Image: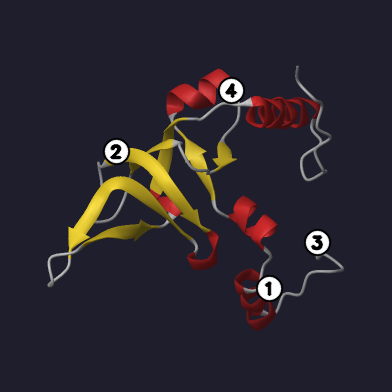
């Protein structure tokens, strides 16, 4: 079945992807959760944010574990603590990592994250996938 407002043109899909607004990029840069977190929260993936702990699962940096220092939405990458390289002039630079190559091992939980988790769990259990979440303030 085709969607009325979405083009099937590859060119238009790429344009929409690379010109996406920052709030849309946040959702596109979601990352899978570890097995323990999947069981605990009953969800598959979560939008990545600063202070989450991740493990790199593929690429030349596979196996490295660290805390997310920055989510760089403009370049579609994240920067993880302790994953650096030395430039020829001796300076250390952070290595950008694609969020799809990581697994979140520890979430930074606060009030907003808690309400989002409950909304995602509720949407999964009621079968309302694809609908907007209705957040409930958690006190």
State the image quarter where residue 66 is shown: top left
* Residue extending furthest toward the right: 4
**Residue identified by numbered label 3:** 1
Are the two marked residues, 1 and 4, in contact with CB atoms closer than 8 angstroms?
no
Are the two marked residues, 1 and 2, in contact with CB atoms closer than 8 angstroms?
no
**Residue identified by numbered label 1:** 16
Quadrant including the N terminus: bottom right
Q: Is residue 37 visible?
A: yes
In three-dimensional space, the C-alpha distance between marks 1 and 4, rounded to whole angstroms, equals 31 Å
- Which mark is first along the chain, 1 or 3? 3
In the rendered image, the vertical position of residue 23 relative to residue 124, given as above or below: below
- Nearer the observer: mark 1 or 2; the answer is 2
**Residue identified by numbered label 2:** 65
The residue shown at (69%, 32%) is 116
In three-dimensional space, the C-alpha distance between marks 3 and 2, rounded to whole angstroms, equals 41 Å
The residue shown at (61%, 76%) is 14
Q: Is residue 61 visible?
A: no
In three-dimensional space, the C-alpha distance between marks 1 and 2, rounded to whole angstroms, equals 32 Å
- Which mark is first along the chain, 4 or 1? 1
Quadrant including the C terminus: top right
- Nearer the observer: mark 4 or 3; the answer is 4
Q: Secondary structure at mark 3?
A: loop
- Nearer the observer: mark 3 or 2; the answer is 2
**Residue identified by numbered label 4:** 41
């Amino acid at each position: 079945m085709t969607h009325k407002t979405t083009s099937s043109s590859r060119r238009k899909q790429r344009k929409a992807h690379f010109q996406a607004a920052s709030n849309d990029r946040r959702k596109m840069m979601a990352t899978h959760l570890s097995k323990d977190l999947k069981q605990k929260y009953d969800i598959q993936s979560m939008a990545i944010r600063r202070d989450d702990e991740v493990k790199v699962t593929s690429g030349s940096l596979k196996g490295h574990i660290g805390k997310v220092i920055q989510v760089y939405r403009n370049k579609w990458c994240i920067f993880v603590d302790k994953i650096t390289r030395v430039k020829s002039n001796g300076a250390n630079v952070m290595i950008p990592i694609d969020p799809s190559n990581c697994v979140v091992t520890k979430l930074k939980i606060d009030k907003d994250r808690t309400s989002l988790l409950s909304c995602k769990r509720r949407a999964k259990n009621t079968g309302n996938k694809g609908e907007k979440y209705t957040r409930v303030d958690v006190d």
